[in-house]
Amino acid sequence: MIQWSVKKAFATVLTFLGIGTLTSCYGMAPNYARVEGTVTSSEDNAPVRGITVRAVDSNGVELDQTTTLEGGMYYLNTRSLGSKVKVVFEDLDGEENGSFKRQSKEIGLVDLDTELNVELENADDEE
């Protein structure tokens, strides 16, 4: 005789239905998408630390903000899987690295992890 606990029976039903987690029973799981990458200088391709990076949705709402780490790396989390976001790169202090031009890129978040590497131009470069 097979003994089933309520928890095991519930998990089996969820698996059979293709749901898999309790979170899904209460509605759609959040559509988290991560954007990550490296920020470098266009002048010498060196990583740039201390750049403010923001993800902004199509309504102008900021989804996440971070600052580049050693090696120019950054990580943003959004709830925008399946949509487009603008990723904005700004050198707000301009002291640590010199000064870089503000730059933004619009990307579609079609995967859970999206890589976006950016080369920033020096603010004093002629256009």
Image (cartoon, rainbow, N blue to C red):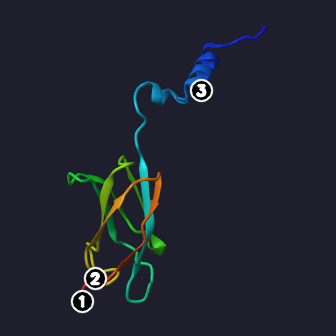
Dots 2, 3 in contact, CB < 8 A? no
Left or right: where 99 falls relative to 11: left
The label on residue 124 is 1
Report which quarter residue 2 is drawn in. Answer: top right
The amino acid sitting under disc 1 is: Asp
Number of residues whose C-alpha sits closer than 10 Å to that of mark 1, classed few (under 14), some (14–19) or many (20 or more): few
Residue of label 2: 99
User: Mark 2 against mark 1, which lies toward the viewer?
Assistant: 1
Screen quadrant of the N terminus: top right
Against 57, residue 5 (above or below) is: above
Against 74, residue 99 (above or below) is: below
Number of residues whose C-alpha sits closer than 10 Å to that of mark 3, classed few (under 14), some (14–19) or many (20 or more): few
Q: Residue at x 46, y 30 (%)?
A: 23
Q: Secondary structure at mark 2?
A: loop
Against 86, residue 98 (above or below) is: below
List x then y, in percent, for residue 108.
36, 57
Q: Residue at x 44, y 84 (%)?
A: 45
Residue of label 3: 15
The amino acid sitting under disc 2 is: Ser
Q: Secondary structure at mark 3?
A: helix
The amino acid sitting under disc 3 is: Thr
